[in-house]
C-alpha cells in the first residue's frame, strides 16, 4: 500500500535480500497508448499500477479504447482493445504525469480528435511548449498560449516534417513519432544525443516500420505516416529508475547485499548503474536476457567504499531521473561529486536541483548548484541526517531522502509521502522487507 503523510527513515543496519522493482513506468505508458491505437486486443503483463500510469489508462478509455484488468494466477494482465479514437466528453486529467500527458497529446493529434489536457498544480507548472511547437509545425491546432496546461487540442490534418530537437527528450520525440502515425508523408526526428528509445522499440513490436540511423552524436528517426499498428503482447520489466533506490540503499549502508530481480538494463537507461560502479560500489548484472524487445537482468549491489566522481553532461539522458538518488550516494562517498548537464531538473515535478540542495543541507551535507550543475561534498559515510525535507510534491525527492535516512547518523524525515504512489506504490514495504526502518513521522 502507498504511504501518506510524513515519514521518517532511520539506520537499522544492513539492507539485505531479494526484491522486485515495480514495472517500468516509461514502457507501461507506451504499452497502453500503442495498444489503444492498434487493431485487435493487446495484452500487458507487469504494468506499473501507479497513479501516473492508471491515469493514462483512464485517458485511453475516454478516447474510445477498451481497457480491462484481469487478475490471473501469475498476476494482473491488462487487455487493451484498440479503436478509432473519439473526442472525449471531459478533459483528460493526467495528475502529476508529464510522460502520459505529452505522449497522449502527440497520439491524439495524430488521431485527429479534440481534447483538453489538464493536470495537477505541479504538472500545470511544467513546460508543454516543447511538445506543442513540433505538433503545430505538423499542422495540429494546439492552444497553449503560455506553454502550460490546460491545453486545448483541435482536429487538424497533419503532414510530415523534419524536426531537430534542441535538447534530447524522449517525451518530445515520442509525441512527434506518435503524431506521425496519423500524418501524411514522412516525419523525421533528429535528436542531438540518444534519448531513451522505448517508443521506437515498441512501435516496431506493434508492427510499425522505422528508419533509425546515427546522426553526429545523436540519432535520426524517420517514420512514414498512415501505418496501422497491430496488437501485441508486452511484458513490462522492472523500472531501473525505481530499482535505483534499492541499489543506492545497498551501496550506502555497510554490510548490505541486495539482488533486484528482472530490471530493464537498456543502455539508454542504465547510466546510474555505470556511475554507481565507477564510484566503487559492487554492481553486477546477472542473467542478462531479452524481454519483449528490451534487455533485462537481475542487478546485484553490495556495499563498498565510495568515491566522488565527475558525471559529464553526456550521461544525463541515460539517467536524468536518477540524479536525486545519485546525490544521496554522493553524500556518503569520499570527495566531491560533480554532476553536469542538469538543466532539465529545473522543470521536473519540482525544481529538483533546488530540492536536492536544500535537502542535503538540511541533513549536514555541503552542496551547491548552478543553472545546470550540482556539486555534493561527500562525507565519507558520515552523514549527520536529522533534517526534515520538503518534498515539493516530488516522488523522487521523497524516496531519495528516505534512503538517506537508512544510513545516516540521525533519522531523516520527509513532510509528505503520498506522491510516492505515482511510481513505486510498494516502496516503503519493499525497503522494510530488506531490513530498512521507515515509520510515520
Image: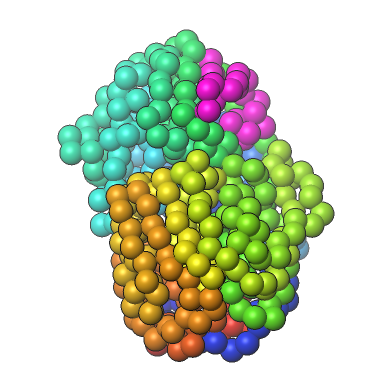
Q: Is residue 325 magenta?
A: no
| 56 sits to left or right of 427 | left
Name of the residue lying farthest toward the right: 287
Seen in the image, is 304 located left or right of residue 188?
A: right
In the image, residue 354 lies at what x, y percent? 30, 61
Point out residue 213 in the picture as x, y percentages from the top left corner.
60, 21
- The residue drawn where x is 66% and y is 51% is 264
Q: What residue occupies the far top of the structure in this picture?
A: 185
Query: What span is in magenta?
Result: 199-224
Residue 234 occupies quadrant? top right
Name the residue nearer the viewer: 350 or 4: 350
- The correct choice, above or below, for 65 with respect to 404 in the image is above
Q: Which residue is drawn at 27% across and 24% down?
A: 141
The quarter holding residue 428 reads bottom right
- The location of residue 295, given as percent across then percent down, is 72, 44
Up the image or down, 14 lies above or below 358; here it is: below
- Taking the view exactly as shown, the residue that stands out farthest to the left is 145
Q: Which residue is drawn at 65% across and 59% down?
A: 277
135 lies left or right of 99: left
Q: Residue at x 54, y 70 (%)?
A: 333
- Residue 294 appears left or right of 342: right
Amino acid at each position: 500500500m502507498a504511504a501518506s503523510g510524513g515519514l521518517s527513515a532511520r539506520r537499522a543496519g544492513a539492507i539485505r535480500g531479494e526484491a522486485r522493482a515495480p514495472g517500468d513506468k516509461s514502457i507501461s505508458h507506451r504499452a497502453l497508448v500503442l495498444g489503444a491505437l492498434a487493431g485487435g486486443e493487446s495484452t500487458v503483463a507487469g504494468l506499473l499500477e501507479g497513479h501516473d500510469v492508471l491515469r493514462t489508462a483512464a485517458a485511453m478509455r475516454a478516447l474510445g479504447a477498451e481497457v480491462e484488468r484481469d487478475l490471473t494466477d501469475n498476476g494482473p494482465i491488462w487487455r487493451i482493445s484498440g479503436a478509432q479514437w473519439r473526442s472525449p466528453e471531459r478533459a483528460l486529467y493526467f495528475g502529476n504525469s508529464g510522460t502520459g500527458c505529452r505522449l497522449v497529446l502527440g497520439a491524439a493529434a495524430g488521431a485527429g480528435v479534440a481534447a483538453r489536457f489538464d493536470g495537477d498544480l505541479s504538472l500545470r507548472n511544467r513546460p508543454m511548449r516543447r511538445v506543442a511547437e513540433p505538433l503545430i509545425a505538423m499542422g495540429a491546432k494546439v492552444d497553449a498560449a503560455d506553454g502550460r496546461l490546460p491545453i486545448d487540442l483541435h482536429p487538424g490534418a497533419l503532414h510530415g516534417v523534419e524536426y531537430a530537437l534542441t535538447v534530447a527528450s524522449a517525451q518530445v520525440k515520442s509525441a512527434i513519432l506518435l503524431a506521425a502515425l496519423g500524418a501524411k508523408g514522412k516525419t523525421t526526428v533528429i535528436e542531438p544525443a540518444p534519448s531513451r528509445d522505448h517508443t521506437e522499440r515498441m512501435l516496431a513490436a506493434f508492427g510499425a516500420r522505422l528508419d533509425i540511423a546515427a546522426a553526429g552524436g545523436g540519432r535520426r528517426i524517420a517514420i512514414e505516416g498512415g501505418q496501422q499498428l497491430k496488437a501485441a503482447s508486452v511484458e513490462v520489466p522492472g523500472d531501473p529508475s525505481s530499482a535505483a533506490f534499492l541499489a543506492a540503499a545497498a551501496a550506502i549502508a555497510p554490510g548490505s547485499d541486495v539482488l533486484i530481480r528482472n530490471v530493464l538494463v537498456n543502455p539508454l537507461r542504465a547510466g546510474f548503474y555505470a556511475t554507481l560502479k565507477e564510484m566503487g560500489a559492487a554492481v553486477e548484472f546477472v542473467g542478462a536476457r531479452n524481454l519483449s524487445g528490451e534487455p533485462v537482468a537481475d542487478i546485484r549491489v553490495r556495499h563498498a567504499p565510495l568515491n566522488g566522481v565527475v558525471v559529464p553532461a553526456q550521461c544525463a539522458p541515460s539517467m536524468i531521473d536518477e540524479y536525486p538518488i545519485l546525490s544521496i550516494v554522493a553524500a556518503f562517498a569520499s570527495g566531491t561529486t560533480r554532476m553536469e548537464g542538469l538543466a532539465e531538473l529545473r522543470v521536473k515535478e519540482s525544481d529538483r536541483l533546488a530540492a536536492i540542495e536544500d535537502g542535503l543541507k538540511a541533513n549536514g551535507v555541503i552542496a551547491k548548484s548552478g543553472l545546470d550543475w550540482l556539486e555534493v561534498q561527500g562525507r565519507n559515510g558520515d552523514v549527520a541526517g536529522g533534517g526534515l525535507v520538503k518534498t515539493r510534491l516530488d516522488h523522487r525527492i521523497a524516496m531519495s531522502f528516505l534512503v538517506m535516512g537508512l544510513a545516516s547518523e540521525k533519522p531523516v524525515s520527509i513532510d509528505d509521502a503520498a506522491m510516492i504512489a505515482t511510481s513505486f506504490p510498494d516502496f516503503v514495504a519493499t525497503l522494510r522487507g530488506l531490513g530498512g526502518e521507515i515509520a510515520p513521522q
